[in-house]
Image: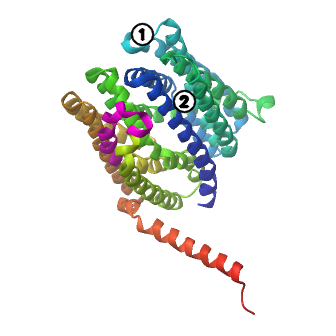
């Protein structure tokens, strides 16, 4: 647990910096582009992430698993990563380009150059995601966290530079985003193979098992992606680009609460893959209790100030984002809990369990959103978001109980983390008092 908390500390610093940079980007894009422009920019980001993810057969998950469990060495891993990661990056670029042309009218009007930029971004996104698996699997948490902090600061700095332009456009924001993605992918590629570049070994006996694991995870991850984004796609189709602009602000503001669970999720596999089942289950429960507690109190605090903070930060024209944001908060708490439990199934070599969970969750989200979005627009999308994540969390609890015999309700026990925090605070207080007063002789 200590190693998990240490590694989580690095990733928390990383995700905190990324969250701040993301907030800067969100604020400036909203104020400089307005709801319609913000909607177009969000659509571009959506296509980059979706195409890059679909094109990647979960090479990052396979790399993370085989390196974390010590079933493959880095010098044998990197040739596979370079080959399949490069092919995935090319495929991601092609998918993003044609997806922008055929589907996203809001991007096609921006011109050929912007479409090419978005396609390059998808390829860079795919390669960067691949290298995350290598870096976390080889336990180079400090290295990837340090670079990610630098990358986030570079991105925020370039976005701040755009404020100096007379009329910054959606194309300017897209260019900066893709430039940062390309830099990120290149640096991670160098770091991932650091120490192994001079003695790489191509060993074909690993190809089948590597791809087999990756594809077994792939179905679940793609389903999870669509489960997360179905509401956004349907909102764009039924309500248009302006509604997407409002909704994207609600989502990006609320999903700042993902910072801590996302940080712990990144290092869970590396810390539980080699442990016994019981120990891994207990670590999962303990980490999930902490995350659920922080997410709950964070949601209560953020919800309390959201009424005035969103219009204050983004401008009065984004007042329509407030209600969807509030409706989303319970769903954000639910997905935060799922993030901590999902790696347990992966680490036990059971990737098909998350596949089942996300398949059913994606189906539920599709049905709910098809009913609610045409009727209620952004409010319907936000409600579908929350309901589907609660359904997903319930399924996760069922399967976790089936595998471990442990009651899922323990994860929602916020008393244990609170009592532990209070006990630690008291111990620290009395220790400091003793140092200041001195122990009587």
Task: Estimate the spatial distance between the alpha carbons at disc 1 and disc 2, rounded to whole Å.
Answer: 35 Å
Q: In this view, does 129 lie to the left or right of 53?
A: right
Q: Is residue 317 magenta-colored?
A: yes
Q: Reply above or below: 32 against 382.
A: above
Mark 2 — residue? 211
| Display colour scheme | rainbow
Q: Is residue 111 magenta-colored?
A: no
- Which of the 4 image quarters holds residue 297? bottom left
- Does residue 104 appear in the picture of this structure? no
Secondary structure beneath label 1: helix
Secondary structure beneath label 2: helix
Q: Which of 305 and 171 is in front in this view?
A: 305
Counting from the top left corner in percent of width and height, residue 125 is at: 55, 26
Counting from the top left corner in percent of width and height, residue 166 is at: 55, 16
Counting from the top left corner in percent of width and height, residue 55 is at: 50, 22
Instruction: Name the dominant secondary structure of the magenta segment.
Output: helix
Say which residue appears at 50% left-offset and 57% top-offset: 287
Q: Which numbered disc, 1 or 2, marks the residue closer to the eye?
A: 1
Counting from the top left corner in percent of width and height, residue 358 is at: 36, 38
Q: Which of 430 and 11 is in front in this view?
A: 430
Which numbered disc covers residue 108? 1
- Which of the 4 image quarters holds residue 17? top right
- Does residue 317 appear in the picture of this structure? yes
Magenta span of residues: 311-333
């Amino acid at each position: 647990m200590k190693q998990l908390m240490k590694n989580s500390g690095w990733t928390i610093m990383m995700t905190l910096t990324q969250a701040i940079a993301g907030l800067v980007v969100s604020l400036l894009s909203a104020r400089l582009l307005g709801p319609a422009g913000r909607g177009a920019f969000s659509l571009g980001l959506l296509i980059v992430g979706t195409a890059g993810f679909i094109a990647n057969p979960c090479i990052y998950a396979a790399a993370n698993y085989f390196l974390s469990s010590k079933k493959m060495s880095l010098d044998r891993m990197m040739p596979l990563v370079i080959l399949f990661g490069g092919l995935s990056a090319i495929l991601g670029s092609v998918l993003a380009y044609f997806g922008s042309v055929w589907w996203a009218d809001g991007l096609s009007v921006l011109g050929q150059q912007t479409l090419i930029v978005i396609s390059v971004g998808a390829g860079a996104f795919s390669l960067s995601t691949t290298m995350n698996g290598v870096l976390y699997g080889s336990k180079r948490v400090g290295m990837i966290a340090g670079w990610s902090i630098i990358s986030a600061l570079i991105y925020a700095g370039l976005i701040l530079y755009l404020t100096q332009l007379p009329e910054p456009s959606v194309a300017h924001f897209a260019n900066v985003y893709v430039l940062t993605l390309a830099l990120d992918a290149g640096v991670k590629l160098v770091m991932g193979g650091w120490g192994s570049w001079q003695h790489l070994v191509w060993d074909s006996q690993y190809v089948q098992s590597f791809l087999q694991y990756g594809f077994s995870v792939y179905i679940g991850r793609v389903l999870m992606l669509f489960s997360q984004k179905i509401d956004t796609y349907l909102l764009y189709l039924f309500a248009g680009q302006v509604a997407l602009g409002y909704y994207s602000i609600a989502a990006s503001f609320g999903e700042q609460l993902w910072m801590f669970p996302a940080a712990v999720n990144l290092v869970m596999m590396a810390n539980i893959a080699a442990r016994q089942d019981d120990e891994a289950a207990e670590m999962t429960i303990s980490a999930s209790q902490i995350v659920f507690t922080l997410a709950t109190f964070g949601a209560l605090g953020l919800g309390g100030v959201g009424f005035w903070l969103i219009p204050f930060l983004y401008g009065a024209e984004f007042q329509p984002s407030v209600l969807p944001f509030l409706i989303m908060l319970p769903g954000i708490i639910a997905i935060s809990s799922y993030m901590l439990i999902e790696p347990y199934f992966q680490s036990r070599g059971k990737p098909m369990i998350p596949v089942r969970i996300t398949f059913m969750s994606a189906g539920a989200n599709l049905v709910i959103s098809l009913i609610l979005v045409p009727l209620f627009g952004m409010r319907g999308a936000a409600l579908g978001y929350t309901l589907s994540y609660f359904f997903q969390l319930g399924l996760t609890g069922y399967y976790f109980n089936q595998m471990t015999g442990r009651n899922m309700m323990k994860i929602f026990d916020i008393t244990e983390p609170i009592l532990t925090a209070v006990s630690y605070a008291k111990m620290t207080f009395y220790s400091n008092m003793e140092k200041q007063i001195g122990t009587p002789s």
